[in-house]
Image (cartoon, rainbow, N blue to C red):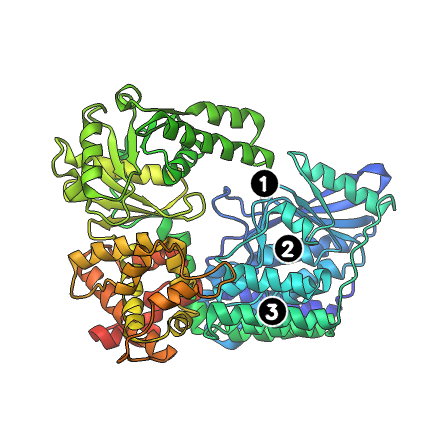
Amino acid sequence: MTTSPTTDHRLQELLDRGIALSPDEVVTEAKARDVALPLGAGTMVLITLDNGLDHTRPNTFGPASLRALNEALDAALERDDVVAVGVTGKPFILAAGADLSGLTGLRSRDDAKLIAELGHGVFRKLGEAGVPTFGFVNGLALGGGLEVALHCTYRTVQDSAPALGLPEVMLGLVPGWGGTYLLPNLVGAAGAVKLIIENPLNQGRTLTGHAAFEAGLADAEFGGADFLEQSLLWAARVLTGQVSVDRPEVDRGDAWDAAVAKGRSVADSKTGGAAPAAYRALELIAGARTAGRDEGFAAEDEALADLIMTPELRASLYSFDLVQKRAKRPAGAPDRKLARPVTKVGIVGAGLMASQLALLFVRRLQVPVVLTDLDQARVDKGVHYVHEEIDKLLAKGRLGHDKANRFKALVSGSVDKGDVFADADFVIEAVFEEMRIKKQVFADLEAVVSPECVLATNTSSLSITEMAADLEHPERVVGFHFFNPVAVMPLLEVVRGERTDDATLATAFATGKALKKTSILVQDSPSFIVNRLLGRFMGEVGRIVDEGTPLTVADGAFAGVAPMPPFFLLSLVGPAIALHNNETLHRAFPERFYVSPNLQRLVAAGKSSVYLPDFSIDPEVAELFAPPADGVELTGPQVRERVLTALAEEVRIMLDEGVVAAPEDLDLAMITGAGFSFWNGGLTMLLDREGFSEKVSGRPFH
């Protein structure tokens, strides 16, 4: 191994200092065992990362975990009889990267740089070991979890691994334990920019194991329960010369500069220059073309030391805490012991949203799910959609044949609610967003379901209390609002009407947990959390455009705030749906919520988008949105200030009204339901940081 005694002594000192900074770390052990490789290849020391907890807490790397790995590597590399070292993880998880909870205890730039140097000091032993090293990526591998594999000489990946990626930029950091140097030198700058910049800034997108192999992150992929055995056999073939690993040559010419330039364009559009992490990562990728390993790693150390001390990182840690902790213990949820079992689900409606719900319920609850609608053709179409989606999962290897057949058998349809809902424990309606229709649906349901059956509504804006008012048992009605697409969006708004009882609410939360959704308790109020805030957002933007500001100026004012420009969001949601939401909110709060005549004209013209397929503005829409002769044109910064001031006002009102328990719930909802960024802390941390909270109400939200 190339590490000198002096260097290793310094690493020991750094580890001791790091451990003192992170006294509460959950330690990931590095469990080493000798493996006699097939084909007479010799002895491999296989190190398995394992924090001793179940899959709900992935392996992470804090200082004590890094020391455990360092000791295992040193012990293996001191032996003369070892021909290779392998690293893998506990079942389905390699590692989820650095222990972010430990970053909250860092008080200085020197502390931050220490953490950066620790990762490099330990991980680089895998790349400079003097014997071949193998990373066996058996499942989730994010951030430092992927970087530990990148340091290895060779890599295999389980084709069904659910998530591989380098999400650090989304958190206000860079992949600082080798990622920005090793990845571009492995797969080229274009691949590195996609994984380090584009994917994190697109809602934290990750790769499956197969996609990671296709992208060149791994040298071989294997499937099935014997992944490790296949990987060990492959390693033996590599060591005995039976398998040769040939990697494409990396283009270090103009393509490298072009990739970095593309990454900068993505960063500009997504962050508006407001978050430094993406730009720092691009500098590191650009430098990796000519830098040596020592130089590249030293640059990462400096970048991490700078970024760990930024407000964006502090906001990211707040966001991370929300999705990791608060999401698992919903504020205000009743005692889970009150929840009733759900052994059969009914869905009123068989359209796209209802069919998506059916697929989710059958996959997660694995109980009978029955769709109903006005006629058999609609019912058949809904059931066919679910069966077709199950077949797609089967074709992708995400379901086995037996489970696919069982799921399809559990999904059925009928036009007669009385026959199929009598023994249902949970019935949710997903019909047209009109109060009269929904009240009639619930009246019909109450006549046929059992007294204990929960009646849920997927309404996005209407009053749960009013919907249940005429029922004999209004206490069993609850809002159960999903976000589209149902399979992807994590948020579930659980809405308590004035008479919803604790047993119904507890059953709703237990069901949400079984569906693997982030459930947030909301008191009954117009449009609940996300749609109310987005309604105020879009209403203010619409008013500004109606007054004379060009649509393109308004669209460009929110890079780094919203996940996409407002009129892109309008086109994604659908103008008619957005108009309905704004009209609902205007009826409730006419003094604050604006209904845009331009939007009304857009809907009346039958337009489903402001944009053409090439993302240019539709000329017919531009004509509809013609500014008034005496219009007032604002600049981008003026648009941003005016809209964020309005949002700060709405947040304060919602908190004062008790719509949610705390600002944390608003932020969790905006992160998981609207895609607001981690590095802003959702919404309220941004409003605090930029002074809008103080401006509106004289005090911050936190």
Q: Is residue 336 visible?
A: no
Q: Is residue 569 visible?
A: yes
Asked if residue 116 is positioned above or below residue 397 in the image, the reply reads: below
- Percent from the top left, x then y, of residue 479? 25, 42
- The amino acid marked with disc number 1 is Pro
Q: Which mark is residue 91?
A: 1
| Label 2 residue SS | helix
Q: Give the residue displayed 83% in from the left and 52% down from the top.
A: 80
Q: Give the residue displayed 28% in from the left and 41% down from the top.
A: 432
Asked if residue 29 is positioned above or below residue 292 in the image, the reply reads: above
Give the distance between the C-alpha atoms of the residues marked 3 and 1, in whole angstroms. Answer: 37 Å
Label 2–label 3 contact, CB within 8 A: no
Q: Residues within 10 Å of mark 3 (few under 14, many from 20)?
A: some
Residue tagged by mark 3?
262
- Percent from the top left, x then y, of residue 502? 21, 38
> Which callout, 3 or 1, points at the residue further toward the start of the chain?
1
Q: Is residue 284 left or right of residue 391?
A: right
Residue tagged by mark 2?
69
The answer to which of 330 and 261 lies nearer the viewer is 261
- The amino acid marked with disc number 2 is Leu
- Quadrant containing the N terminus in the rendered view: bottom right
Q: Quadrant of residue 586?
A: bottom left
Label 2–label 1 contact, CB within 8 A: no
Give the distance between the C-alpha atoms of the residues marked 2 and 3, in whole angstroms. Answer: 37 Å
Q: Residues within 10 Å of mark 1 (few under 14, many from 20)?
A: some
> Which callout, 2 or 1, points at the residue further toward the start of the chain?
2
